[in-house]
Amino acid sequence: MTSLTIVRRIAARPSIVFTALTTPEGLGCWWGPDEGPVLIAETDVRVGGRFRVRFRLLDGTEHESCGEYVEIVQPTRLVMTWRWTHGGEPDEADEESRVEIDLRPIDIGTELTFTHARLRTEISRASHTDGWNGALDKLERHFLQPTERSLS
């Protein structure tokens, strides 16, 4: 098993970033590694609740993941299981991994630490690193133009 960790600085306060991580509308703004659309985003944000997200890449392929919320500390921490239900990394087929997201207030808004653990192979880790970096790039861009709402 292996894992990846990505740290980003986002120009919005933690509660606003948390909303982008946990609502269907928020997920639609950043989920997926390229500019392809989010087709389905469902969340039931409570311990034991489930999420499901389906997105289409620019090459036309569709991918879907789902999982269960394991830990929720609003607005600073989100932990969930992760499983590909369609497409995704072949090394992870029928496997469950774990995503942990920690949000810490900083001068410009939020430091986001994203960890995807329990990945099966180095190939899978590299693939997920590329995918999550693409998605987190979109999340950062979503908040690039600070507004009163994102910083107040």
Image (cartoon, rainbow, N blue to C red):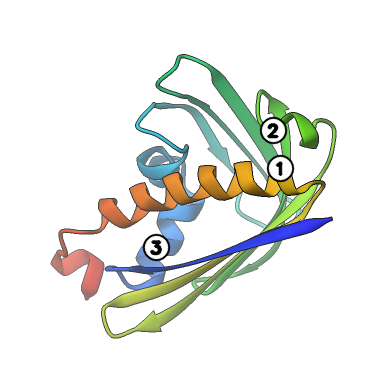
- Circle nearer the viewer, 1 or 3: 1
Q: Which residue is mark 3?
A: 17
Residue at the spot 36% in from the left edge and 51% down from the top edge: 137
Q: Position of residue 14 (x, y in %)?
A: 40, 72
Residue 47 seen in the current view? no
Residue at the spot 21% in from the left edge and 59% down from the top edge: 144
Name the residue nearer the viewer: 133 or 56. Answer: 133
For the C terminus, which image quadrant? Answer: bottom left
Residue 77, relative to residue 106: is it above or below?
A: above
Q: Amino acid at mark 3?
A: Val
Q: Amino acid at mark 1?
A: Ser
Residue at the spot 27% in from the left edge and 51% down from the top edge: 142
Q: Position of residue 105 (x, y in %)?
A: 39, 82
Residues under numbered marks 1 and 3 in contact, where contact means CB atoms less than 8 Å apart: no
**Quadrant of the rendered structure where residue 19 is?**
bottom left
Q: Disc 1 and disc 3: Cα gap in Å?
A: 27 Å
- Mark 1 or 2 closer to N-term? 2
Q: Which residue is mark 2?
A: 89
